Image (tube, grey):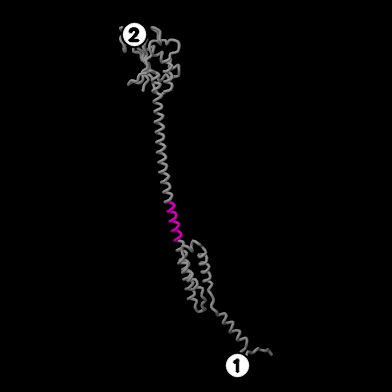
Amino acid sequence: MKTVSLLKTRSGGKLVPTIVLSSILLGACAASPTTPQAALDVREKLTELQSDPEMANNARNELRSAEEAVRIAEQPLGSGQADLADYRIYMADHMVEIARAKGTTRLLETERTRMGEQRDAARLTARTLEADRAQADAETARSSEAAAAALSAAAAADLQRRIDDLEAEATERGLVLTLGDVLFATGSAEIQGGSNRNLEKLVGFLNEYPDRNVVIEGHTDNVGSAQFNQTLSLQRAESVRRHLSDHGVERRRLTVNGYGLERPVASNESEAGRQQNRRVEVIIEN
């Protein structure tokens, strides 16, 4: 025969079986309200946002509201309040997503503003660099112009010194250097041997200024026939060209003409005048 423990109670003096009381207590525990698992999932999402410094800074008010909604969703409800629990969880999750969206939007706006500021700063820097470069170019141009002017002045001074040394006359045709008849023997077109200082100066000048072309003109007095003098004047001009060419002056720069007795510079009535007319003129073109 099984023995059943009996518990004596104060209620009505009746005895209640211990197993029945235990069942009641277990049923009461099973029916106790608990926090829904979905609320815990929403809490995890919220915690993730709160731990992000940028989100915490850009959605401070929204996170505060989401925190309140999650606390409400975490409150235990009885089994008969499932709809209310679902609603609270829905609202909490919705508030968390609002906080996420607001934080992301403000973060993007901040980034856009920062990039705009960087772009403006870059443009300002570019304009500054462009202005500096323009100023530097202008200063370089001024320096170059000054240097060119100084060089030009020096070159002009050197040119004038060389012209003075040549004893050439400046004319509209160019520089005219007159070579007297002492270059040639009487009736001859061959340049006499020995060094001629004027020819040496002419060679040096033409080699230093290779961009200048030369016209060589032969002239005679009126002694002898016009044909003889014409031929002689051309031959003497050709002899000067040959001498210059032999000393480094390009032949293509040299043009010769013979004018015979046609262009006297003095009277042929005297020996002194005839001597002046017997000449070779070298015109260095401008």
Q: Is residue 121 visible?
A: yes
In the image, what residue type sits under mark 2? Ala
Looking at the image, residue 265 sits to the left or right of residue 18; the answer is left
Looking at the image, the residue that sits furthest to the bottom is 13
The total number of labels drawn is 2
Tell me whether circle 1 and circle 2 mark residues in contact (CB < 8 Å). Answer: no
- Position of 9 relative to 279 (above/below): below
**Residue at (31, 11) in percent of width and height:** 266
The answer for how far apart the CA atoms under marks 1 and 2 are is 178 Å
Residue wearing tag 1? 14
Residue wearing tag 2? 272
Q: Nearer the viewer, residue 152 or 112?
A: 152
Task: Tell me which numbered mark, 1 or 2, is placed earlier along the sequence.
Answer: 1
* Circle 2 crowding by C-alpha within 10 Å: few under 14, some 14–19, many from 20: few
Query: Which stretch is magenta?
Result: 105-119
In the image, what residue type sits under mark 1? Lys
**Residue at (41, 27) in percent of width and height:** 154
